[in-house]
């Protein structure tokens, strides 16, 4: 590994975990109508940690920049392990799903990748509650303002895909705080309900009512975090130890440190 490696080479060389995310993971996609989203975690080389060229995040898309992905297109997002851990401990809903990605949806998983998933209960805390609330509120406002996919808005008078993901977000935010884990793919009967939303079989007014109910319950949890099944703070000592081992052992193996 060296500083002039391409972003993609860094990703594939240091990858410890990669899995399918998005509708394919949640089990809510429309057959033949979805692109494929993958998320990966990478241990980057030391020069991209300590040197002037920092490496934390890379996206690879088959569709041209600014063009929506077509059915079957592949979009891959990679994070450095450091950035992934930072986002996950902050409670970022978009990255948390990778921690619960099952074997059936895994592309790459090393021993460190397995250990990362096993640490989910030590990573996720009640810090996630305001994050879920913020994401949910933004998605609800975008739906109301019709600011998302014009083709779906024209067909259904609603971006049904965004609506589906907004409802899923609210549901999973509550599930995570009630049980301390996420079901992936989404469990029944919610998965059927989400598919109905995606197919345009649920009225916009009913979707908004449902989203407001999720917001209310998440706000109650924010005010009373002791009711959550999640820990109050991540286990910082454990996670720091994992990061140290993952980086030093990988660098030692690759570079002879």
Image (spheres, rainbow, N blue to C red):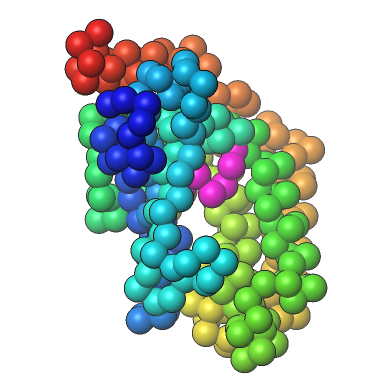
Give the residue displayed 58% in from the left and 87% down from the top: 201
Furthest toward the top, the residue is 257
> What main secondary structure does the magenta stretch of the protein show?
helix
Picture quarter containing residue 118?
A: top left
* Residue 93 lies in the magenta stretch: yes
The picture places residue 97, in percent across and down from the top left corner, at 46, 48
Q: Is residue 187 visible?
A: no
Q: Is residue 127 visible?
A: yes
* Residue 135 lies in the magenta stretch: no
Furthest toward the front, the residue is 4
Q: Which residues are magenta?
A: 91-99
Give the vertical position of 46 relative to 73 (above or below). Answer: above
Q: Nearer the viewer, residue 95 or 83?
A: 83
Give the vertical position of 15 relative to 173 (above or below). Answer: above
Q: Nearer the viewer, residue 79 or 230?
A: 79
Give the residue displayed 42% in from the left and 30% down from the top: 81
Give the vertical position of 223 relative to 159 (above or below). Answer: above
Residue 151 lies left or right of residue 76; in this view the side is: right
Residue 27 lies left or right of residue 114; in this view the side is: right
Identify the image quadrant of the C terminus: top left
Give the residue displayed 27% in from the left and 20% down from the top: 250
Identify the image quadrant of the N terminus: top left
The picture places residue 204, in percent across and down from the top left corner, at 71, 81
The picture places residue 43, in percent across and down from the top left corner, at 35, 28
Total count of labels: 0
Give the residue displayed 70% in from the left and 87% down from the top: 157
The picture places residue 19, in percent across and down from the top left corner, at 33, 50
């Amino acid at each position: 590994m060296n500083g002039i490696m391409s972003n993609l080479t860094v990703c594939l060389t240091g990858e410890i975990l990669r899995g399918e995310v998005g509708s394919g993971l949640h089990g809510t996609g429309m057959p033949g109508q979805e692109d494929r989203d993958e998320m990966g975690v990478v241990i980057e080389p030391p020069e991209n940690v300590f040197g002037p060229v920092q490496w934390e995040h890379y996206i690879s898309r088959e569709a041209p920049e600014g063009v929506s992905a077509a059915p079957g297109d592949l979009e891959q997002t990679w994070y450095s392990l450091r950035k992934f851990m930072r986002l996950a401990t902050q409670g970022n809903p978009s990255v948390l799903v990778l921690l619960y990605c099952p074997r059936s949806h895994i592309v790459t998983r090393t021993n460190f990748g397995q250990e990362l998933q096993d640490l989910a209960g030590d990573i996720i805390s009640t810090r996630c509650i305001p994050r879920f609330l913020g994401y949910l509120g933004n998605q609800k406002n975008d739906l109301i303002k019709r600011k998302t996919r014009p083709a779906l808005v024209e067909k259904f008078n609603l971006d049904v895909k965004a609506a589906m993901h907004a409802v899923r977000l609210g549901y999973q935010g509550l599930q995570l705080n009630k049980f301390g884990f996420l079901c992936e793919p989404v469990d029944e009967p919610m998965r059927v309900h989400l598919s109905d939303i995606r197919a345009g079989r649920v009225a916009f007014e009913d979707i908004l009512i449902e989203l407001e109910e999720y917001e209310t319950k998440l706000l109650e949890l924010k005010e009373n975090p002791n009711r959550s099944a999640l820990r109050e703070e991540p286990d910082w000592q454990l996670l720091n130890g994992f990061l140290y081992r993952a980086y030093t052992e990988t660098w030692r193996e690759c570079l002879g440190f």
